[in-house]
Amino acid sequence: MYKTQISNHSYCFESLRDLLAKASPLRSGDVLAGVCASSYEERIAAQLALSNVPLKNFLNEVVIDYDKDDITRLIIDTHDKEAFATISHLTVGGFRDWLLSTEVTNEIILQTNKGITPEMAAAVSKIMSLQDLILVAQKIEVVSKFRTTVGLKGRFSTRLQPNHPNDDNKGIMASILDGLLYGCGDAVIGINPVSDSEEIAISILSMLEELRLKFEIPMQSCVLSHYSLTKSIANRAPVDLLFQSIAGTQKANESFGVYLNDLAEAQEAILALKRNPNSNQVFYFETGQGTALSANAHAMIDQQTCEARAYAVARKFNPFLVNSVVGFIGPEYLFNGKQIIRAGLEDHFCGKLLGLPMGVDVCYTNHADCDQDDMDNLSTLLAAANCNFMMAVPGSDDIMLQYQSTSYNDAAYLRKVFNKKVAPEFERWLEKMGIQNKNGELAFANEEIKKLLNHLS
């Protein structure tokens, strides 16, 4: 039982799970789930009570029973007590102060992160302002490596997302070439296929491999099919990255056909291909607040804490990229621009705090109370927070998934405003191709570009 008092009114919270839910900033998914605070005053009371909870409590009181959930077992069994020793004396409020202090550097946080559980990360984020979330995240540098190096300070990468409603290779290639001319695609060129056909996945991957080899592009590709399909074609296609959407409860993952042991086997299959020349990072994970609730598998946990628990799954497999598709599920979970902006900054903060190479798909569905101004705000705030990567979608409108994201031009804007560059390997290729000059400005003046454009035909 957790208690606090405001204006001579006592508030009681029956469990840590209840306290985390009541302390979470308002969002429609928690209202739908019936776990949110009944008033703003109760929310503040919960945040005050949460700030006084010792971090050690999170190791003794779990939000889902250890025997009933494999993610809970993963969190507890892999907890690093030595890394935790640095912060073990702190409360949630003290943890916030510690993270914000100038003495706590990127190196210290990275040395400590394996002692931080997802619930600790979620808890501290709930008592932080947007400024706090940005200030801490911007000093954390989580670097991942494939053919490009993503996450370095002063760099900003993109996933080039050339989806096509008919999985038409020529249409996909047209969008890719357009994106490359804007300097996009240094994190990954990733396609969401309409079909779950093995033949289509092989065809798309083969086309991307031909492009990579012909123009010696330092890039990695991914077809965002279920991991079981990708594993099944591993010996018949040039598979770089293994994709999977993941959630924060065992029941939610099982509803997607996701099992931790199977993920490990798929990882081994892709590692055996030895296509990553610089590390053993072969996973691309996507997450999103509301995922577990949409599967009716949230176990009465608030959606932001569920989201943080998904990062425990990601952390186990040392991914190359993790992407919170923050507004994709719809207004039932994040109702408007205000909620999406807060959620995006929370997800990025929690992921980075737990040691993950975080990106965010700054996005919304067409029936949400949101518009492109909200997305401009969130993308700018995330760039200030040193987000590793964002999406680059033709015209910001994904015509296959039918939602709004960020465009090629948005990426160029963010690099210009924040004086950021693309990944170093990709930067050298862009300069060689004449796509950008030595100052990082788009140039479009080279015979090599004509060859690139002619490749479409």
Image (cartoon, helix red, strand yellow):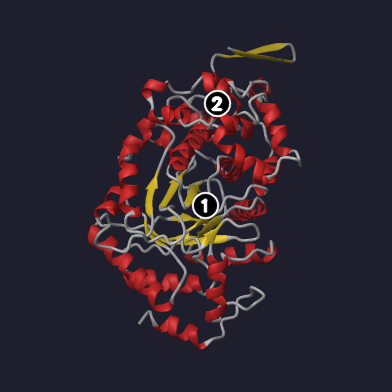
As drawn, the label of residue 21 is 2
Q: Is residue 288 left or right of residue 46?
A: left
Give whichever of 422, 125 is nearer the camera: 422
Give whichever of 250, 365 is nearer the camera: 250
Q: Residues within 10 Å of mark 1 (few under 14, many from 20)?
A: many
- Quarter of the image where one finds residue 89: top right
Residue 85 percent coordinates (x, y): 62, 28
> In the displayed structure, would residue 19 be above or below residue 78?
above
- Quarter of the image where one finds residue 182: bottom right
Residue 157 percent coordinates (x, y): 55, 61
Q: Residue lying farthest bottom?
A: 447
Give whichever of 153, 455 is nearer the camera: 153
- Considering the numbered disc 2 on the image, is that residue within a helix, a strand or a loop? helix
Residue drawn at 40 percent across, 72 percent down: 212
State the residue position of label 1. Answer: 363
Q: CA distance from mark 1 to mark 2?
A: 24 Å
> In the displayed structure, would residue 306 be above or below residue 172?
above
Q: Amino acid at mark 2?
A: Ala
Residue 100 percent coordinates (x, y): 72, 38
Give whichever of 280, 329 is nearer the camera: 280
Residue drawn at 34 percent across, 43 percent down: 263
> In the displayed structure, would residue 154 be above or below residue 138?
below
- Considering the numbered disc 1 on the image, is that residue within a helix, a strand or a loop? loop
Q: Amino acid at mark 1?
A: Cys
- Tally of numbered tags: 2
For the question of whether residue 116 can be seen, the reply is no
Q: Residue lying farthest front?
A: 82
As drawn, the label of residue 418 is none
